[in-house]
Amino acid sequence: MRPSVLDPIFAPVTTLDGVGPKLATLLQTLLAGQTHTVRVRDLLFHAPSGLIDRRRRGEVATAPEGVISTLTLRIDRHLAPGRASSQPYRVFAADETGEIALTYFRAQPQWMEKLLPVGETMLVSGRVEWFNGRPAMVHPDFVAPIAEAETLALVEPVYPLTAGLSAKVLRKAIGQALAKAPALPEWIEPSVVKKRSFPGLNEALAGLHDPRDEADLAPLSAPRSRLAYDELLAGQLALALSRQRMKAARGRAFAATGAISRTLRAALPFALTPGQEKALAEIAADMAKDDRMLRLLQGDVGAGKTVVALLSMAIAAENGAQSVLLAPTEILARQHHAGLSKYCEAAGVALVLLTGRDTGRTRATKLAMLADGRAQIVVGTHAVFQEGVEYDDLGLVVVDEQHRFGVQQRLSLTRKGRSPDLLVMTATPIPRTLVLAAFGDMDVSRLEGKPAGRKPITTVALPLERLSDVVARAEKAMAAGDRLYWVCPLVEESEKSDLMAAEERFRQLSERFGDRVGLVHGRMSGEEKDAAMADFKAGRTQLVVATTVIEVGVDVPDASIIVIEHAERFGLSQLHQLRGRVGRGSKPSSCVLLYRAPLGEVATARLQIMRETEDGFRIAEEDLRLRGEGDLLGTKQSGIPAFRLASLEHHADLMEIARDDARLILATDPDMVSPRGEALRVLLYLFGKDEAVRLLRSG
Ligand code: ADP
Ligand code: MG
């Protein structure tokens, strides 16, 4: 249960004065969207993006056009419009340098005379505009007698807004939210507070909403750093708790005997690369311990992770335990099954493919094999974890291409079986800070290098006007026996036009190349997709027009050219993934990025980076830089938390500290029952990590 101290800020925003249902709806849109019901807390965490500084006083003659100026003016005369006139009410005022008109539409003369009494010297602030050499200020933001000026807010924060919401109303609501912020016990380690000179939470919140100058808006300002740390600590603690929970269940010691892996290795048409051997050795060492394995295997596209997974699963099999290889899509599950089956057959390992497509008798037969232990390795989609799927003795779960799985799913993966070891494989080379953000303290193996003999991929970027050249080149390549992917644009607004683009391109290319052209897209049935991919793999088609369904993991080593239409619409990581479909065989490969001109700045940078490098790690880092951490892996799919206050770009060092601190906390107080543990529970709730608190025995 959420501690009651938090009640005032977890109350609905309508508990604030002047916030009715209409304003609440706007705040919902602005602050919470679809994620949760907006609460007072969300106002506290809504950071200003700028400030209006009215302290710098100006003079009429030199007040710049369109800029907010604060002027000291003597009020000279009022000019009220005639009753029927559409003219504004004008007040003429001046300083030594000149005269300015303060204009008000629909003003009440009486009220105006009280606001700006003739003869008085006033402080007037607002945007100055020049008309025909005469300055005017329409509806000054504020006016005050010079004597009272000091008491007024001369610096005001500027917040991101949403249509229909005024800055003034939002500022007022935030002010009220601040007044409701309860005093909470400090949860940050005293030495960290001291070393970083962190203000207390409420002081930090007050500071966040009261920037005095540009420096206060910087991510590294004291209030922002403190709040970022709070958020990162909450995240790391939540991850550490789930890790503690997963590790608590004792794992099992699987000793690699080599009985099965020797035969498997003998069946492989290649020797493992040193990088593969190293990763495998790390995995084997984990599996040999009776701690539970929680390991992330990072390896660039085409680095050869699958065979590492296979040999890891062989270790489980050598110990009489079953393994699951979980793929994000049906296509990938089938591909893995097809790829592994030749080796498994040679080694006499029973391999079963289980996907959502299995029904009736086949499904029943397969389930029986899983339940009685005949199936040693199960390859499949998330169907392998559905209800009713029982394992005799599940010892290892391998998740392929994890970035399609959320954190929640990852936790539920290991519920089957007796706390199986977990190996998560990702082709997206995630920068370290993101690994921490998404996985917390997971052990990481980096699969370095690529299988020998890979040729570099030549990448070119061409404007769409050169389409006919590209088609001519495709024709030549096909005549020489090459195979090509042709990826069609992702149109965000509508899945339908996405599809239409692919179908249209398919039609055009088919006209030219006949039945050597195939088509695969997300709306096709599983069987149709398989058939299209199988045709391409076997060379019955030489060119396959595809939507991004081929993005992840598809392995057709003979394909050597990929054309990506509207490359400007893809993110860097996605382009890298797509390009990774080629360059897998011994042929030199190429990638053609077709774009529609003119290119924006970011798109230009992306295409440039694609031309410069094939290094997935560098690409991931550039991607992080270009678009911010929010969407590196596609937040929606990845379960990578979107931060409100922290920024991975700026607070990476705080992330490391938070990780270490979280680890230390749980090492000394695993149930979080000490006073600091109690304080940290409040922190978890504050950042909505209720799930994590539930993982505590005494939560
Ligand atoms: P990814 O890491 O992207 O999942 P895959 O496991 O699909 O990569 O491997 C890519 C290709 O490289 C496959 O065709 C695979 O058979 C091949 N491969 C893997 N390891 C080696 C190796 N040591 N030597 C040669 N080819 C390899
Ligand atoms: Mg793969």
Image (tube, grey):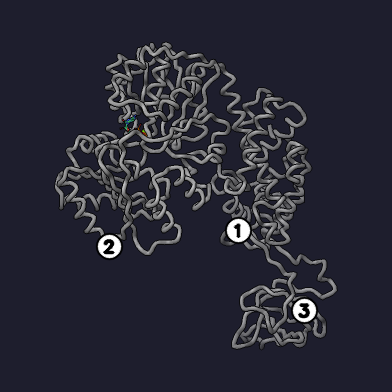
Residue assigned mark 1 = 160
Q: What residue type is disc 1 on?
A: Pro
Q: Position of residue 22 (x, y in %)?
A: 61, 56
Residue assigned mark 3 = 72
Which residue is at a point 23% across and 34% down the rendered structure image?
A: 534
Q: Position of residue 678 (x, y in %)?
A: 74, 31
Mark 2 C-beta to ligand 1 under 8 Å? no
- Residue 4 shows in this picture: no
- The image shows residue 171, relative to residue 205, as above or below, that is below
**SS at mark 2?**
helix
Q: Badge 1 local density, few (<14 within 10 Å), some, or many (20+)?
A: some
- The image shows residue 11, relative to residue 259, as above or below, that is below
Marks 3 and 2 sit apart, C-alpha to C-alpha, by 59 Å
Residue assigned mark 2 = 465
Q: Is residue 355 left or right of residue 230?
A: left
Q: Check contact, mark 2 vs mark 1: CB within 8 A.
A: no
- Which mark is nearer the camera, 3 or 2? 2
Q: Is residue 11 left or right of residue 254?
A: right
**Mark found first going from the N terminus, 2 or 1:** 1
Which residue is at a point 45% across and 37% down the rendered structure image?
A: 403
Marks 3 and 1 sit apart, C-alpha to C-alpha, by 30 Å
**SS at mark 1?**
loop
| Closest to the observer, 74 or 305 | 305
Ligand 1 sits in which quadrant? top left
- The image shows residue 331, relative to residue 145, as above or below, that is above
Q: Position of residue 483 (x, y in %)?
A: 22, 43
Marks 2 and 1 sit apart, C-alpha to C-alpha, by 39 Å
Q: What residue type is disc 2 on?
A: Glu
Mark 1 C-beta to ligand 1 under 8 Å? no
Which residue is at a point 43% across and 24% down the rendered structure image?
A: 280
Q: Quadrant of residue 363?
A: top left
Which residue is at a point 69% across and 84% down the rendered structure image?
A: 61
